[in-house]
Amino acid sequence: MRKPELAALKLSNPLHLLALGFGSGLSPVMPGTMGTLAAIPLYLLVQGLPLWAYVGLLVLGFVAGIKICEAATRAIGRHDHGAIVWDEIIGFGITMIAAPAGWGWIAAGFVLFRFFDIIKPWPIRWFDRKVHGGFGIMLDDVIAGLFALACLQLLAAFL
Protein backbone atom coordinates (compact mmCIF):
# COMPACT_ATOMS: atom_id res chain seq x y z
CA MET A 1 0.00 0.00 0.00
CA ARG A 2 1.28 3.45 -0.92
CA LYS A 3 2.08 5.90 1.82
CA PRO A 4 -0.21 8.97 1.73
CA GLU A 5 2.66 11.39 1.01
CA LEU A 6 3.45 9.44 -2.16
CA ALA A 7 0.00 10.13 -3.61
CA ALA A 8 1.40 13.30 -5.22
CA LEU A 9 3.82 11.24 -7.29
CA LYS A 10 2.51 10.05 -10.63
CA LEU A 11 4.20 7.30 -12.61
CA SER A 12 2.81 9.04 -15.69
CA ASN A 13 5.12 11.99 -14.94
CA PRO A 14 8.53 11.11 -16.49
CA LEU A 15 10.46 12.86 -13.68
CA HIS A 16 8.53 11.00 -11.01
CA LEU A 17 8.88 7.70 -12.88
CA LEU A 18 12.66 8.10 -12.95
CA ALA A 19 12.84 9.34 -9.34
CA LEU A 20 10.93 6.23 -8.24
CA GLY A 21 13.28 3.96 -10.18
CA PHE A 22 10.51 2.89 -12.57
CA GLY A 23 8.34 2.05 -9.55
CA SER A 24 10.95 0.12 -7.56
CA GLY A 25 11.08 2.88 -4.93
CA LEU A 26 7.44 2.22 -4.10
CA SER A 27 8.39 -1.05 -2.44
CA PRO A 28 7.06 -1.08 1.14
CA VAL A 29 10.29 -2.75 2.29
CA MET A 30 13.84 -1.61 1.53
CA PRO A 31 13.03 0.81 -1.31
CA GLY A 32 16.70 1.79 -1.65
CA THR A 33 17.68 -1.82 -2.08
CA MET A 34 14.88 -2.31 -4.61
CA GLY A 35 16.07 0.79 -6.47
CA THR A 36 19.57 -0.64 -6.59
CA LEU A 37 18.17 -3.93 -7.92
CA ALA A 38 16.37 -1.92 -10.61
CA ALA A 39 19.76 -0.46 -11.59
CA ILE A 40 21.13 -3.88 -12.55
CA PRO A 41 19.20 -4.25 -15.85
CA LEU A 42 20.17 -0.68 -16.75
CA TYR A 43 23.80 -1.52 -16.02
CA LEU A 44 23.55 -4.64 -18.20
CA LEU A 45 22.30 -2.47 -21.08
CA VAL A 46 25.29 -0.12 -20.95
CA GLN A 47 28.15 -2.21 -19.53
CA GLY A 48 29.64 -2.82 -22.99
CA LEU A 49 29.96 0.86 -23.85
CA PRO A 50 33.41 2.43 -24.12
CA LEU A 51 34.50 3.82 -20.75
CA TRP A 52 34.12 7.45 -21.88
CA ALA A 53 30.51 6.83 -23.00
CA TYR A 54 29.65 4.90 -19.81
CA VAL A 55 31.03 7.66 -17.58
CA GLY A 56 29.36 10.28 -19.78
CA LEU A 57 25.99 8.60 -19.21
CA LEU A 58 26.62 8.63 -15.46
CA VAL A 59 27.48 12.34 -15.53
CA LEU A 60 24.32 13.01 -17.55
CA GLY A 61 22.32 10.85 -15.10
CA PHE A 62 23.78 12.77 -12.16
CA VAL A 63 23.01 16.19 -13.62
CA ALA A 64 19.50 15.12 -14.64
CA GLY A 65 19.12 13.45 -11.24
CA ILE A 66 19.39 16.79 -9.48
CA LYS A 67 16.22 17.94 -11.27
CA ILE A 68 14.57 14.51 -11.07
CA CYS A 69 15.04 14.22 -7.30
CA GLU A 70 14.13 17.85 -6.70
CA ALA A 71 10.85 17.41 -8.62
CA ALA A 72 9.92 14.35 -6.56
CA THR A 73 10.90 16.09 -3.33
CA ARG A 74 8.69 19.08 -4.16
CA ALA A 75 5.77 16.78 -5.01
CA ILE A 76 6.12 14.79 -1.78
CA GLY A 77 6.97 17.78 0.39
CA ARG A 78 9.74 15.91 2.20
CA HIS A 79 13.50 15.88 1.55
CA ASP A 80 15.06 12.63 0.36
CA HIS A 81 12.05 10.38 0.86
CA GLY A 82 13.00 6.70 0.74
CA ALA A 83 10.92 6.17 -2.39
CA ILE A 84 13.27 8.44 -4.36
CA VAL A 85 15.83 5.97 -5.72
CA TRP A 86 17.31 7.61 -8.83
CA ASP A 87 20.34 8.38 -6.66
CA GLU A 88 20.79 4.66 -5.96
CA ILE A 89 20.66 3.92 -9.68
CA ILE A 90 23.45 6.39 -10.40
CA GLY A 91 25.42 5.33 -7.31
CA PHE A 92 25.35 1.69 -8.39
CA GLY A 93 26.39 2.73 -11.90
CA ILE A 94 29.41 4.51 -10.40
CA THR A 95 30.27 1.40 -8.39
CA MET A 96 30.35 -0.62 -11.59
CA ILE A 97 32.71 1.64 -13.59
CA ALA A 98 35.23 -0.68 -15.29
CA ALA A 99 34.02 -3.64 -13.24
CA PRO A 100 35.06 -7.09 -14.40
CA ALA A 101 32.38 -8.97 -16.30
CA GLY A 102 30.20 -11.53 -14.57
CA TRP A 103 27.35 -11.94 -12.14
CA GLY A 104 29.69 -12.38 -9.19
CA TRP A 105 31.09 -8.88 -9.76
CA ILE A 106 27.60 -7.45 -10.15
CA ALA A 107 26.63 -9.07 -6.83
CA ALA A 108 29.80 -7.77 -5.17
CA GLY A 109 29.15 -4.27 -6.50
CA PHE A 110 25.56 -4.45 -5.28
CA VAL A 111 26.59 -5.50 -1.75
CA LEU A 112 29.40 -2.93 -1.55
CA PHE A 113 27.21 -0.07 -2.75
CA ARG A 114 24.35 -0.98 -0.40
CA PHE A 115 26.82 -1.25 2.50
CA PHE A 116 28.21 2.26 1.97
CA ASP A 117 24.78 3.72 1.18
CA ILE A 118 23.22 2.29 4.35
CA ILE A 119 26.13 2.69 6.79
CA LYS A 120 27.14 6.11 5.45
CA PRO A 121 30.65 6.35 6.92
CA TRP A 122 32.38 9.73 7.01
CA PRO A 123 32.29 11.79 4.77
CA ILE A 124 29.12 10.31 3.25
CA ARG A 125 27.08 10.95 6.41
CA TRP A 126 28.33 14.55 6.61
CA PHE A 127 27.23 15.30 3.03
CA ASP A 128 23.92 13.51 3.61
CA ARG A 129 23.16 15.79 6.57
CA LYS A 130 24.60 19.09 5.31
CA VAL A 131 23.82 19.26 1.58
CA HIS A 132 20.15 19.51 0.66
CA GLY A 133 17.93 19.65 -2.40
CA GLY A 134 18.30 17.48 -5.46
CA PHE A 135 22.07 17.97 -5.42
CA GLY A 136 22.28 16.71 -1.83
CA ILE A 137 20.11 13.68 -2.57
CA MET A 138 22.44 12.74 -5.42
CA LEU A 139 25.75 13.61 -3.76
CA ASP A 140 25.81 11.15 -0.86
CA ASP A 141 25.04 8.25 -3.22
CA VAL A 142 27.75 9.40 -5.63
CA ILE A 143 30.25 9.31 -2.78
CA ALA A 144 28.94 5.91 -1.62
CA GLY A 145 29.35 4.73 -5.22
CA LEU A 146 32.94 6.01 -5.29
CA PHE A 147 33.74 4.18 -2.02
CA ALA A 148 32.20 0.98 -3.40
CA LEU A 149 34.02 1.47 -6.73
CA ALA A 150 37.37 1.72 -4.92
CA CYS A 151 36.64 -1.46 -2.95
CA LEU A 152 35.44 -3.35 -6.02
CA GLN A 153 38.55 -2.36 -7.98
CA LEU A 154 40.78 -3.41 -5.07
CA LEU A 155 39.00 -6.77 -4.97
CA ALA A 156 39.47 -7.16 -8.71
CA ALA A 157 43.16 -6.31 -8.45
CA PHE A 158 43.85 -8.85 -5.71
CA LEU A 159 41.58 -11.75 -6.76
Image (cartoon, rainbow, N blue to C red):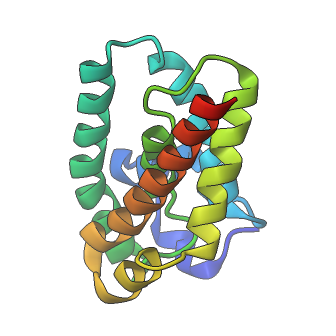
Q: Is residue 125 above or below residue 75?
A: below
| Viewer-proximal residue among 71 and 132 | 132
Q: Is residue 139 above or below residue 152?
A: below
| Viewer-proximal residue among 111 and 41 | 111
Q: Looking at the rendering, in which quadrant would you find the N terminus? A: bottom right
| Viewer-proximal residue among 38 and 118 | 118
Kindly identify the residue that appears in the image at 46 percent across and 39 percent down: 93
**Left or right position of 91 against 108:** left
> Does the image show residue 29?
yes
Pick out the residue farthest to the front: 158
Kindly identify the residue that appears in the image at 51 percent across and 57 percent down: 85
Q: Is residue 77 above or below residue 28?
A: below
Instruction: List x then y, in percent, for residue 74.
Output: 32, 76
Q: Looking at the rendering, in which quadrant would you find the C terminus? A: top right
**Left or right position of 21 against 114:** left
Instruction: List x then y, in percent, for residue 156.
Output: 60, 30
Q: Is residue 137 above or below residue 43?
A: below
Number of numbered tags placed on the structure image: 0
Kindly identify the residue that appears in the image at 23 percent across and 58 percent down: 67
> Does the image show residue 86?
no
Kindly identify the residue that appears in the image at 56 percent across and 48 percent down: 151
Instruction: List x then y, in percent, for residue 19.
Output: 43, 55
Instruction: List x then y, in percent, for residue 47.
Output: 48, 19
**Left or right position of 153 against 66:** right
Question: Within the image, what quadrant is residue 26 found in?
Answer: bottom right
